[in-house]
Image: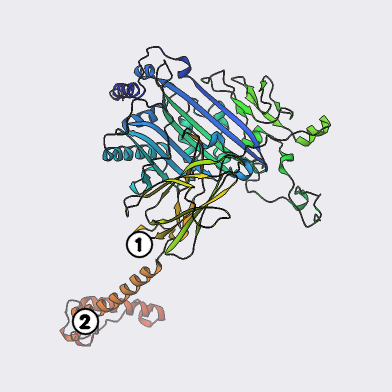
Amino acid sequence: MRQFLPFFSLSLLSFLSTTCGATSTTSDTAAADYHEQLVLRPLPQSALLASFNFRSNITVSEFEAHNFRFFPRSLGQILQHAGTRELHLRFGLGRWDSESWGARPWDGAREGGTGVELWAWLEAQSDEEADHKWLTLTNALSGLFCASLNFIDGTRTTRPVMSFQPEGDHPNTTATDTHLLYGVLPHEVVCTENLTPFLKLLPCKGKAGIATLLDGHKLFDASWQSMAIDVRPICPAGGECVLQIELTIDMVLDIDRSKRPRDNPIPRPPPGHELPCNTSKPYHSHDTCFPADHEANQDWTLSQIFGRSMKGTCPLTDSKVPPVCLQVPNSRAVYHSDGVLEKKNLDRISRCFEIKPDADFEIVLPNPRDDQENNQGAITHIVKPETPLLYAERSFTGHGQERGGMQTILRNPSPDTAVEFIYMESLPWFMRIYLHTMSARIDGQSGKDESLVKEVYYRPAVDRARATQLEVRMRVPPASTVFLTYDFEKSILRYTEYPPDANRGFDVAAAVITILNSANEAVYNLRTTTLLCSLPTPDFSMPYNVIIFTSTAIALAFGGMFNILVRRFVAADEGPEVGLAAVKAKLKGRLAVLAKRFGGAGAKKGVVEEVKPVPVADVKE
């Protein structure tokens, strides 16, 4: 390790200097900080969005001094060894309900589809070299995060052309020596094994600060959750270039389910008389219940939601950044622990808390009905969610095991603004797209509308070698719904290529939608849900039955024939005489046992009559 560190520091130092073009010798104090923040935002239908954000920077001078400080050394060595200029890794689970929860957090920039997503900009002189470094990167990250990233091979890797844009500063790079690769594993199950390495990348290792609230039981019991890791170079004007890492965890918790006591780990439905019903409905009765508005029952505490209270603050964090913020109307009462300074922002929808380093922190959000009774007036319970720029749904069409179709419904909720975006799909090689069948039409109109599709990039798949890549630049008019459809053909796999649960189906990765502004810059990102593609599946029990039947028939035939050919039949007098003494001894012993059993006279006196020898010819084998 001592011999490797100087090479690592000098190599990455030259990488940052070349990439960012910085020559400043003074360290920017704002570029070498570390801060963490938790933002809590109540959502409709008894949901709570919790966004954990950890960000740290490391300057070139700190690399030169071999002082990683807040940047994880393990991840930094992997990026340097694989020649990675910018990295984005996502772990996703669940589905974001945009109809109820509104716009996505971070404008979708920290969101990933179900499973694992990875895309990175690699420094290489050729495609072969980029593929080799990509293989090195995926295998190293697989061991670091305890994930199956090593299964991202050529059949799950694409090279996006229009969809992704770098978030860092790359002024001195060219298209010839920078390669963007994108890989996805929609079947990967995200669990606690991925959260533990995530916490080890933090300076306080989950022992202090907001990271103490990250419990695997609560995180993976959420309705939706996403873990993101972003590494990018930042070069401020006139300052020293830094390498910035940002770790983000977003999850939507069900308040009623999170408040379940620990002695009741299995969720059970409440009794009928405890259900919150809307009694204003005309059909309400003792056996009919229409669910009441959950916004009026959002009373919770921090320890109820996360199972524990917050243990102070991380001593390494920036004191200027408040560790916890709550987005609720200022008219709503919020109680907190003693010694905590509350600051209300001017936007009247958020408040932040300054916490003592060694004190436990607790938040209590009372029932809005109690506040309404005390204030003698109506109050706003939650902040109204923002309307997303686009709604997207994707599903399969058709029937049968040979062919099928894909349909994506894109709806623009804006009444006066059109939405322009890039739609990208990374499909497995066994889904063969018929590109000539792709059509886009507006709801209520028949036939294709060529004005909706501006540009199409299609890279066909190669069997067992390369995935199918489809990128479409589209435009949806205001207050319109566009249907994007195409047909595809399903391939028949070899029987060794089917997984153990072949009848379940094959996971198809989520589509990536990047919404652009007038300057062709990404302003909003969203993912559709993953799909299950059912392929023609053979009956795997038939080979087993054939093997058993064939083995039995061969055993019977071969055994009989071998017995006839090998066994030799001889007469009794032709047998060996060597066994005569053994036969005599065995008969004498048997007769002695019979004499004792039946109590003969010879047995009482302890005398056994001598047995006369039997001729060999009379002894049968």
SS of the residue under disc 1: helix
Q: Quadrant of the N terminus?
A: top left
Q: CA distance from mark 1 to mark 2?
A: 40 Å
Q: Residue at x 34, y 46 (%)?
A: 153
| Dot 2: element | helix
Residue matched to label 1: 495
Give the amino acid at mark 1.
Answer: Tyr
Q: Residue at x 56, y 55 (%)?
A: 445
Residue 289: percent from the left, percent from the top? 76, 53
Q: Is residue 331 left or right of residue 465?
A: right
* Between 548 and 271, the one nearer to me in the picture: 271
Q: Residue at x 57, y 23 (%)?
A: 313
Res. 621 image quadrant: bottom left
Q: Quadrant of residue 498?
A: bottom left
Q: Toward which corner of the image does residue 602 lie, by quadrant? A: bottom left
Which residue reaches farthest right? 376
Instruction: Please tell me which residue lies in front, 110 or 258.
Output: 110
Regarding residue 607, the answer to whether it shows in the image is: no
- Foreground: 125 or 68? 125
The amino acid pointed to by label 2 is Ile
Q: Is 570 situated above or below 386?
A: below
Decide: marks 1, 2 in contact (CB < 8 A)?
no
